[in-house]
Image: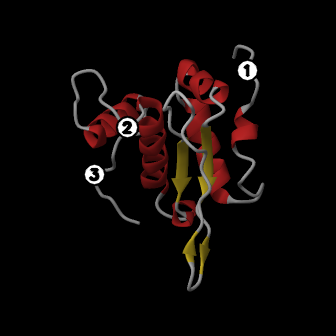
Amino acid sequence: MTNTDRSVDDLLQSFAPEDPLRGRVHLVLTAIPEEVQIDFLRDPRFSITKLHFEGGFGTKLYIAFPSPDGTGSRCVALKPRLSDCAEPFGLYIIAHELAHAYLRNGPWGDVADPEDAADALAAHWGFPKPIDIRW
């Protein structure tokens, strides 16, 4: 890994050390290509967090304002149930959401649709969409 201002562990600060989701996110983040990791680590607008639901109030999510050049936040917000769903499905969802962030919700190669592009890139990284999807 080349020098960056942050580490993968820095990206996981919003997750409790004992949270199984932290382990799953760490597994995906360290499995994706180095250039993608570096892109995330060097971008101060990139963050990854776990959504926290408050009964009767919903969810609060704080993200960065758009920058002066119009660049938006690259926040990946994951649902808590990704901690205990079937592991292949959880890893796929995490990789899919990271792919969206990396592609900035755009296409990948010849794949124009952002959802299909995120699926294709996640599969390319080794996290294909499971055939039998179960939460």
Residue that carries the numbered disc 3 in the rendered image = 131
| Residue 19 location (% of width, % of height) | 70, 60
Image position of 123 with respect to 5: above or below:
below
Q: In the rendered image, which quarter is residue 17 located in?
A: bottom right
Residue 60 percent across, percent down from the top left:
60, 66
From mark 3 to mark 2, how far is it between C-alphas? 24 Å
User: Upstream in the sequence, badge 3 or badge 2?
Assistant: 2
Q: For the residues carrying marks 1 and 3, which lies nearer the camera in this image?
A: 1
- Residue at x 59% of width, y 84% of height: 55
Relative to 24, say whether 114 is above or below. above
Q: Residue at x 53, y 29 (%)?
A: 32
Name the element at disc 1.
Answer: loop
Q: Are marks 3 and 2 in contact (CB under 8 Å)?
A: no
Density class for disc 2 (Cα within 10 Å; few <14, some 14-19, many ≥20) is some
Q: Are marks 2 and 1 in contact (CB under 8 Å)?
A: no
Q: Is residue 50 left or right of residue 135?
A: right
For the point 49% across and 63% down, the residue is 85
Separation (CA) of disc 1 from disc 3: 37 Å
Q: Residues within 10 Å of mark 1 (few under 14, many from 20)?
A: few
Q: Nearer the viewer, mark 2 or mark 1?
A: 2
What kind of residue is marked 2? Asn
Amino acid type, residue under disc 3 in the picture = Ile
Q: Which mark is residue 105?
A: 2
Dot 3 falls on a residue whose secondary structure is loop
- Relative height, residue 38 to residue 57 (above, below): above
1 or 3: tag closer to the N-terminus: 1
Q: Residue at x 66, y 51 (%)?
A: 22
Q: Which residue is mark 1?
A: 4
Task: Choose between 38 and 95: the one closer to the eye.
Answer: 38
Q: Quadrant of the C terminus?
A: bottom left
Q: Amino acid at mark 1?
A: Thr
